[in-house]
Image (tube, rainbow, N blue to C red):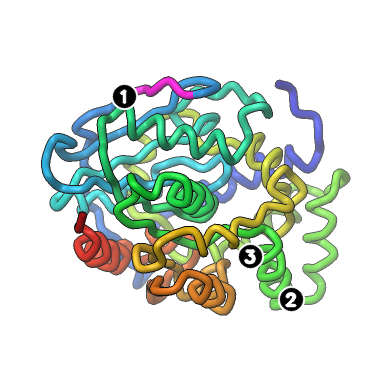
Amino acid sequence: MIVANASLRILALFFGALALFVAGPGQAGQARPVQPYADPDREVMIPVEGGRVYVRINGDLASDAIPAIFLHGGPGGIHNGFAAMLGLASDRPVIMYDQLDSGRSDRPNDPANWRVERFVDTLETIRQTLGVDRWHIVGMSWGSAIALEYTARYSQHSASTVLGGTFISTPHWITDANLLIADLPEEMHPVLEACESDDPPSPEQCIAVFTMLYSRYYERVPSSEAARAYAARVGGNGPNPVIYRGMWGPSEFSSTGTLRTYDATHLLRDVDGTRILFLIGQYDSARIDTVQDFVRLAPGAELAVVPGGSHGFMSDRPLETEAILSGWLARNDIP
């Protein structure tokens, strides 16, 4: 596919700039873990509708422990951000994968595949292929939408569900995004609007305004040496701005793609709220006021906030995040 749209070229440039920002050297006073992340015990390419997806597993799926599977954001993100959670594999198998069109998975870039139900079907195909009966589902951002949809459809296979950096409704997300933008200096507003148009200004101007927003709400701490080493080791094609633009839009703050009217809040009444954890960062773009409203729609659900964390709280505060997840998963290791 040849992409000629000017704003998509800006988006691709920004994806690259953001990767450099998150992978940059640590700042003074922000020491990060340097212990290398564990290699997978098993890797497999699983055929799904539209192609094959890359799946990595740590731990023994034949054990009695209930596994946890991690669903990355985007659409078009990659599993790498979950590598800091591999310490959980000391208690249970940990499964991570790249969604179709992302990372090490096949990349057909066919819009016919960009349907929410197909992403949910892919998750069920992975479960069946790996021979897992029940698992904990940990979704992040867009992965939360897949996690909620899957749990509503396949509750018998869902031991618990974590809706991290909760995205389950585009109207709610855009309302919150407008509030975050309102906190920007007034002179930045027209620049942001222009950068999300089909006739954007220079890449430098757009990268500057996007970086200001993303560094506040998406990645407050540069990624660790371990994360940079993992990214270099794992390879793959990285994030995919084509599917991101097609399904979502020009940036996190504007939706023009197929998800622009998406809203799954009604599904919260179809799931067991006592098995639902909403998990956000203190400075998350998923605003706590909105997420608390979601919690009230799922009686019995819990809310946890990662101190100091942004939308990328697993990278910002990995030890705190792992501790929260470890406790939650252990409490829900029940039939």
Q: Which residue lies under the disc numbered 3?
A: 212
Camera-nearest residue between 93 and 202: 93
Over which residues does the magenta segment extend? Answer: 44-48
Task: Point out residue 317 in the picture as x, y percentages from the top left corner.
Answer: 35, 66
The structure residue drawn at horizontal position 84% and vertical position 55%, both measured from the top left corner, is 194
* First along the sequence among labels 3 and 2: 2
The structure residue drawn at horizontal position 65% and vertical position 56%, both measured from the top left corner, is 263
**Where on the picture, by quarter, is residue 115?**
top right
Are the residues flagged by discs 2 and 1 in contact, CB closer than 8 Å?
A: no
Picture quarter with the N terminus: top right
Camera-nearest residue between 3 and 89: 89
* First along the sequence among labels 3 and 1: 1
Q: Is residue 85 visible?
A: yes
Picture quarter with the C terminus: bottom left
User: For the residue marked with disc 2, what is the amino acid?
Assistant: Ala
User: For the residue marked with disc 1, what is the amino acid?
Assistant: Val
Q: Is residue 75 left or right of residue 62?
A: right
For marks 3 and 2, give the one nearer the viewer: 2
Answer few, some or many: residues within 10 Å of disc 2's Cα (few below 14, many 20 plus, some between 14 and 19). few
Answer few, some or many: residues within 10 Å of disc 3's Cα (few below 14, many 20 plus, some between 14 and 19). few
Relative to 51, say whether 335 is above or below: below
Camera-nearest residue between 19 and 252: 252
User: For the residue marked with disc 3, what is the amino acid?
Assistant: Met
Q: Which residue lies under the disc numbered 2?
A: 182
Task: Point out residue 64 in the picture as x, y percentages from the top left corner.
Answer: 12, 44
* First along the sequence among labels 2 and 1: 1
Q: Which residue lies under the disc numbered 1?
A: 44
